[in-house]
Image: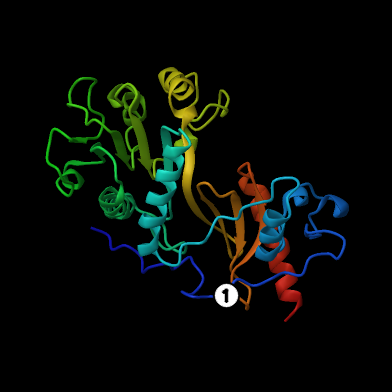
Amino acid sequence: MVAIATPAAFLPPLGASLATHTPHPASRLCRHPSSPRNGGGMASRRLCTMEAALEGAAGGGAPSPSPSPIPDSRAAMPPLAAAAIRAARTAGVRRMEVTFPPVDASSSASLSAVYAASVAFSRSLLRRLDAPPLTVVAPDATAATEFAPPPPHVAVGSPRRGAIAPAPGGVLFVAPGFNVDEYIVAEGVTPPGGEAIVVNGAVDKVRPGGGWWGYYPVLFYPEVARVGERYWKDFVEVFFVKAMGDGGLLVRVWPGDWTVWFTAGGGGAEVVWCGKERPPYPEVAKMLRARLVEEQLKR
């Protein structure tokens, strides 16, 4: 088994302050080099400070951004994810995606490391969910032995429809995708009316929108495309933490907004963008590079 990375290697130090980034006097929106006024296209929703968000929330008018918090440590992630799942349930969300970095951002994530981190996270998550039991679909037989209760509420890999007795609450998929069949059978093992939660499932691989030459080309994987349209397209990212290059994170903790955090500054973590829709990764990288250049010019 590959050792899991030390806690929060990709996060700012525990207790780090949230630095403020002085907004332009005429606006609560930042004017970074990539803003529309400087040739870019994302600044209409870029948030300069946490204070600006709180001010907007108290002042009425148009809905103000609600930044998602950074987990202080890896140990803090399951409780945050459980709270996000409960909030999403209350809002009627039945298909939920949970994603977090399984290893140190500076390390390559081997399959065994992804499994180990995802299993440990999922076990902790299950203990915190105040809901009817969930069927756990584990990535392999070894991982399955680490869950309770025992079968019939634990399955392995890509079980056939009807091969397991579904738990009343729904299903929890742990790190599916090593075998493409795990994506295909997921729909069949989700009980009608039950919820589905996927942990580190790389759902973007099977969401519609990849075109003929997406991760799974339609020409060669037509059933993946069909199940993506019927089932996987409905999954909502309720807890999402992705370490980005240039010292930043893309975070979403339901019901908060998508938030880009810059963590390479000397004064602590800082919000550089916040919005309702997930920004494309290249745009996140541009934001962080621009902010990193600003930080370097100050030194």
Q: Which residue is mark 1?
A: 17
Residue pictured at 60% horizontal, 61% vertical: 261
Residue at 48%, 49% in the rendered image: 240
Instruction: Give the image's coloring scheme.
Output: rainbow
Amino acid type for the residue under numbered disc 1 = Ser
Q: Choose between 90 and 104: the one closer to the eye.
A: 90
Q: Tell me if residue 98 can be seen.
A: no
Rendering quarter of residue 272: bottom right
**Where is residue 27, by image quadrant?**
bottom right
Q: Residue at x 58, y 25 (%)?
A: 211
Horizontal relation, residue 225 to residue 64: left or right:
left
**Mark 1: few/some/many CA within 10 Å (<14, 14-19, 20+):** few
Q: Residue at x 77, y 52 (%)?
A: 43
Residue 55 left/right relative to 109: right
Task: Examine the rendered structure and indicate whether residue 99 appears above or below residue 299.
Answer: above
Residue 113 visible (yes or no): yes
Q: In this orientation, which residue lies closer to the viewer: 25 or 119?
A: 25
In the rendered image, residue 152, in percent from the top left (x then y), is placed at 13, 32
Assign a secondary structure to mark 1.
loop
197, 163: nearer the viewer = 197
* Residue 209: x %, y % from top left: 57, 28
